[in-house]
Image (tube, rainbow, N blue to C red):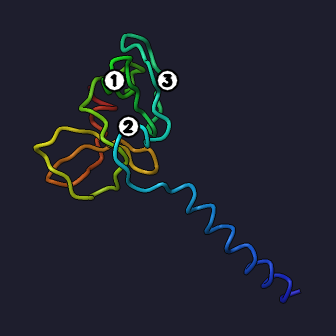
Amino acid sequence: MAVLALTCGIAGAPMLTAGTAAADRGPCDGVDCVPYVKRNITPTDHCQFKSRYPFGLDASGNTFVCAARNQWVPVAPLVGVRTMRAPCDEAVPGTAQTPAGQLLNCRGNAWSAYNDVLYYK
């Protein structure tokens, strides 16, 4: 029985690794590589708030996030997917999304959680 369990564990390990690697896209540049961005939103319409994957683009390409009050809020342009605390240039306005869908902005020359726009604006 122990041999069977050990064999199944070893056979299952590569499948878990492959699944994780496929889901974690990592950093990328540009709007087109950011998953779950809603396209052609109408900024005056209500949205369905979720704390992850909050981005929307209007027909002109302007960037918005769906805030906790279920309204679209304008933010700096979406620049891509970034990891938390990765270096950035505060002089270049932009927002980003983590691989897990969290909203980021550049503060202190590092990508940081940008929750105040979701909950307080």
Secondary structure category for the residue under label 1: loop
- Callout in the foreground (1, 3): 1
Question: Which comes before the other along the chain, label 1 or label 3?
Answer: 3
Circle number at residue 48: 3
Label 1 – label 3 distance at C-alpha: 20 Å
Circle number at residue 31: 2
Residue visible at 28% across and 29% down in the picture:
120
Residue visible at 45% across and 40% down in the picture:
52
Q: Is residue 14 left or right of residue 35?
A: right
- What residue would you read off at disc 1? 61
Residue visible at 45% across and 24% down in the picture:
39
Label 3 – label 2 distance at C-alpha: 21 Å
Question: Which comes before the other along the chain, label 3 or label 2?
Answer: 2
- The x and y percentages for residue 7 are 80, 83
Residue visible at 28% across and 24% down in the picture:
74
Secondary structure category for the residue under label 3: loop
Q: Amino acid at mark 3?
A: Gln
